[in-house]
Amino acid sequence: MKTIKYIAVLCGLALLTSLGALARDKNQRTVEIFEPVQVGQSQLQPGTYKVEWKGTGPQVQVNFTQNGKTIATVPGTLKTSANVAHDEVVTQTTSANAKSLQEIDFHRGNESVTFAQSGM
């Protein structure tokens, strides 16, 4: 009888842990940046970033985190579209011949985040 109780408790904990992970993942995605880009006042180097936004939209605060360290926090606009086919990082070349981050489209969740441009 004790074995059944332990199994039931373990199953319950596993269920709660997985539900917590799903809830936490709602406002964050992972994105691969392939070239240096400017976002806000920060320069993002090539690599994998966790992109997490706070707020329900459309205006949100977006954090770019890499290896557990916040690299940039910038304002953004959250949009939802049924037409997002794949993950995509949209950049624009500035007058100084640098790349500026315009938008990140996330396939999973059909969401995108756009960024206001400064100094263009």
Image (cartoon, rainbow, N blue to C red):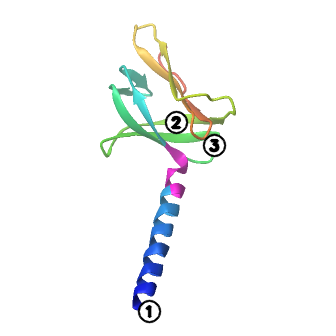
Q: Are marks 1 and 2 in contact (CB under 8 Å)?
A: no
Q: Amino acid at mark 2?
A: Pro
Cα–Cα gap, marks 1 and 2: 55 Å
Does residue 44 show up? yes
Secondary structure beneath disc 3? loop
Question: Which is in the foreground here, disc 1 or disc 3?
Answer: 1
Q: Residue 70: give x, y in percent of width and height.
A: 35, 42
Give the extent of the magenta segment: 22-28
Q: Amino acid at mark 1?
A: Met
Secondary structure beneath disc 1? loop
Q: Residue 82: give x, y in percent of width and height.
A: 69, 33
Q: Residue 35: give x, y in percent of width and height.
A: 36, 19
Most frequent secondary structure within the magenta stretch: helix
Tell me the crowding category of disc 2: few under 14, some 14 to 19, or many 20 or more residues within 10 angstroms, Cα based: some
Q: Tell me which label, 1 or 2, sits earlier in the chain.
A: 1
Question: Which of the 4 image quarters holds residue 36?
Answer: top left
Q: Amino acid at mark 3?
A: Gly
Q: Which residue is mark 3?
A: 57
Q: Which residue is mark 2?
A: 75
User: Where is 22 relative to 70, above or below?
Assistant: below
Left or right, 61 with reference to 69:
right
Q: Which mark is residue 1?
A: 1
Cα–Cα gap, marks 3 and 2: 11 Å
Q: Work out which quarter of the rendered image holds the N terminus and state it.
A: bottom left
**Residue at left offset 68%, top offset 33%:** 81
